[in-house]
Image: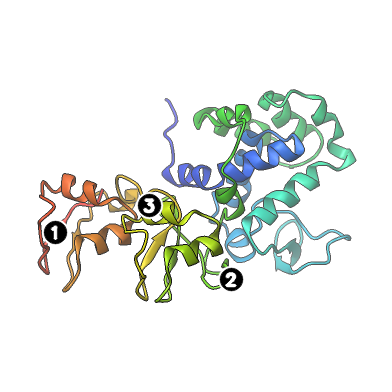
Amino acid sequence: MAQRRNSVYEDYINRYKDVAIEQMMKHRIPASITLAQGILESGAGRSVLTVSSNNHFGIKCHNEWTGKRFYKDDDMRDDCFRVYDNARESFEDHSKFLLRPRYKSLFSLKITDYKGWARGLKACGYATNPQYADKLIDLIELYNLTEYDYAKKFDKFIATHAGANTSGHYANHRIYYRNKNYYLVANGGETFKALSREVGVSYRKLAKYNERDKNDVLSKGDIIYMEKKRSKAEKMYKNRPHVVKPNESVYDIAQLYGIRLKYIYKKNNLSPDYVPRPGDLLRVY
């Protein structure tokens, strides 16, 4: 019986593929291996260790670690684990961990030899689970992660902000993640040009991504996405239509779910001159 894909795993892959490709280009570790290990070690980003410490690979403190620490029972009671400020730091530290002499033999393999890497990691003592290599290979094949081993470029913005949450922030704004996109919440009074200088995305693109005029002055609470919005909301909203609230516009709803205006009209067979009324039900997936 064929395995079914897990949407949580797919979200993890979409969120971290660029940082995995970045690590591959810097350190010659297959992006497929990094992603598969991340999924296994972090529970696709949902483990206690990952949520609390941004530690995606279960790397313990060891003697040389001088950073923050998180303690939890593992092989021993109150084992010490490394704490990172963000996911990208965890991915970088994982790469450096594999650059140790113990794993030197792996770097003689082709970067596209994911089976050799998976079995080599197990042979070098990376994990104690006898099925570890098979689990990595199964994940790589089920989710076609090998496509990232052939990548020639990656999105630097996404790699830099991979795993952003309420603890990650720019100079004046925190960064959040929704519907495979990064966004910030305006403080009020900003322009797209001002935001552009802060986040490193052109003001024309920011305005276009958010279906706004490039000269708009933003109001407090405006949601501003860093990439083009999607055609539908996250899967959790498949059978959960949005209930219109008082004074809520179609644009407000589009920003709330990170989808483009035209798709709300299309999904609900509405014309652009539709004015929502409180209590109306609108499909967003």
Please report whichever mark, 1 or 2, sits nearer to the chain's N-terminal start: 2
Q: Does 40 appear above or below 119?
A: below
Please report whichever mark, 1 or 3, sits nearer to the chain's N-terminal start: 3
Front residue of this view, candidates 279 and 261: 261
Name the kind of residue labelled 2 in the image: Ala
212 relative to 72 in the view: left or right: left
- The secondary element bearing badge 2 is classed as loop
Pointer 1 residue: 281
Mark 2, other Cα within 10 Å: few <14 / some 14–19 / many ≥20: few
Front residue of this view, candidates 184 and 241: 184
Pointer 2 residue: 171
Pointer 3 residue: 209
Name the kind of residue labelled 3 in the image: Tyr
Mark in the foreground, 1 or 2: 2
Quadrant of the rendered image containing residue 107 = top right
Picture residue at 28% right of the left edge, 53% below the top: 237
Q: Position of residue 52 (x, y in %)?
A: 60, 66
User: Separation of disc 2 and disc 3 at Cα?
Assistant: 21 Å
Q: Where is residue 93 in the image (x, y as percent from the top left)?
A: 75, 52
189 relative to 135 in the view: left or right: left
Name the kind of residue labelled 1 in the image: Leu
Front residue of this view, candidates 170 and 47: 170
- The secondary element bearing badge 1 is classed as strand
